[in-house]
Amino acid sequence: MKVLIPFTGAGLIRMDLTIEQNCPSCGASIVLQEDDRLIRCGYCDVNNYRLESVAARYLLPSKLPDYIDPMQLFFIPYLRFKGSIFYVCAGEVGHKIVDATQIGIDEQKLPISLGLRPQAMKLTPVTAAVDGVFFQQTVLTKSAFVHAAKVTELFSGKSEQSIYHRSFIGETLSRIYQPCYIHEGMVYDAVLNKLLGSAKWIDRHMDKTCSSKISWEPQFISTICPECSGLLSGETDATVLHCLNCESLWHENTKKFQPLSWQVVESDDPLAQYLPFWQISFSVKGSSLTSFGDYLRFTNQPLLITKKFDLKPLTFWVPAFKLNPKSFLQLSAQLTVSQWRIPSGCKRRLVNDHPVTLNQKEAVQAIKSVLAVSTLNKSNRLPLLPQMTIVDAKCELTYLPFIKQPHDFVQEHTSIAVLAAALRFGRKL
Ligand SMILES: [Zn+2]
Ligand SMILES: [Zn+2]
């Protein structure tokens, strides 16, 4: 029997921003997508990896009239969130894709959001060479984030107390600056040269401005294998790179490539596709969940819980790639419940692999939501979530074989299926 993960992402527009970036090696102009990490330059043929740890800052393009000097520009910060929100409240686990901008200063005379504008134009990264004045963000990132979640109407009619858990997964947080200028006492939007109103409000913000800084610029590292000096390779949106020379996997942490612990569960089918999962072991403070048997009892699975399950340590299986939220949670919950069917893996040559596009930290964030989704007796168990804290999480990357069928990929040992369209859609999240 095939277990099918439903997919409801069809018809959504591409949300990625388009960025015009100079090649860090030769300066040539490269157009890339917001989530691209591995930047290939067609001119100098050098690959660079864009650091995730530096929160991106982008400018909307300005078209200035001749009588305005670029030095007169000032830039208003907007915070941008893109990702999935999971929430757990009485008897239900919900999710929503969020793609929103929110003004980063406290000023009611300006639009609260940038609307679809950032998606409609080519953005450029902020560099230290940009003329003009930058308004500093004064709205706390976290409160803006929660506000963005609320404006999606996700929580309408639900009080904060009734929400047992909320997490943001696969999120991109960046700042997008709206250029403006003042002409004859009036403020203009420099993207369209549109009048925004009187400039009277500007003065009260002027002590919270600065010039752009070098530390705001995107940072890159070279894609050389730290082990053997071979070239690391990967898809442009991959956050884990592969050295084909010494068969090692690397991810960026503290501005360096660090080695990853990984394994492959083998298949006899030479055409099998290997999807990456974070196999996460962890402890739970505030609960007696320690073994796989405990988990099966907590979630009330219709399984005979034998000693074998009580001796098996608790691990969760979370996709190491982006998917629409519903498929992500269900795939994760189904694999976690069925993990006893999966044989152990080994180190071997990695082929036909799907890129890793969701990092460990985000996967750990999903644990409580996955627990909630796999729980069958929701009304008894979900109220226990707030007192549970996930600690000591350790992730190992495990590639599982999936066999391609006309419309989906089916996991060989568990028969759990993911729609091919959901995988494709995930690359665009
Ligand atoms: Zn170049
Ligand atoms: Zn190597």
Image: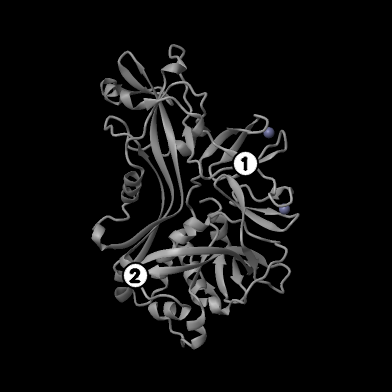
- Label 1: element kind: strand
| Residue 286: image tag | 2
The kind of residue on which mark 1 rests is Ile
- For the residue pair 105 and 414, the one nearer the viewer reads as 105
The kind of residue on which mark 2 rests is Gly
* Quarter occupied by residue 184: top left
Image location (x, y in percent) of residue 420: 58, 62
Colour basis: one colour
| Mark 2 neighbour class, 10 Å CA radius: few under 14, some 14 to 19, many 20 or more | few
Q: Is residue 275 left or right of residue 97?
A: right
| Residue 70: image tag | none
- Label 2: element kind: loop
Who comes first in sequence, dot 1 or dot 2?
A: 1
How many numbered tags mark residues here? 2
Q: Residue at x 60, y 36 (%)?
A: 31
Cβ atoms under marks 1 and 2 closer than 8 Å:
no
Disc 1 to disc 2, how far (Cα)?
41 Å
| Residue 221: image tag | 1
Image location (x, y in percent) of residue 338: 52, 77
- For the residue pair 110 and 356, the one nearer the viewer reads as 356
Q: Is residue 392 above or below residue 130?
A: below
Q: Does residue 404 show up?
A: no
Q: Is residue 145 left or right of residue 200?
A: right
Q: Is residue 34 above or below residue 290?
A: above
Q: Residue at x 72, y 38 (%)?
A: 45
Image location (x, y in percent) of residue 405: 63, 69
Label 1 or label 2, whichever lies nearer to me, is 2
Image location (x, y in percent) of residue 165: 34, 62
| Mark 1 neighbour class, 10 Å CA radius: few under 14, some 14 to 19, many 20 or more | some
* Quarter occupied by residue 210: top left
State which quarter of the image contains the N terminus.
Answer: bottom right
- For the residue pair 228 and 249, the one nearer the viewer reads as 228
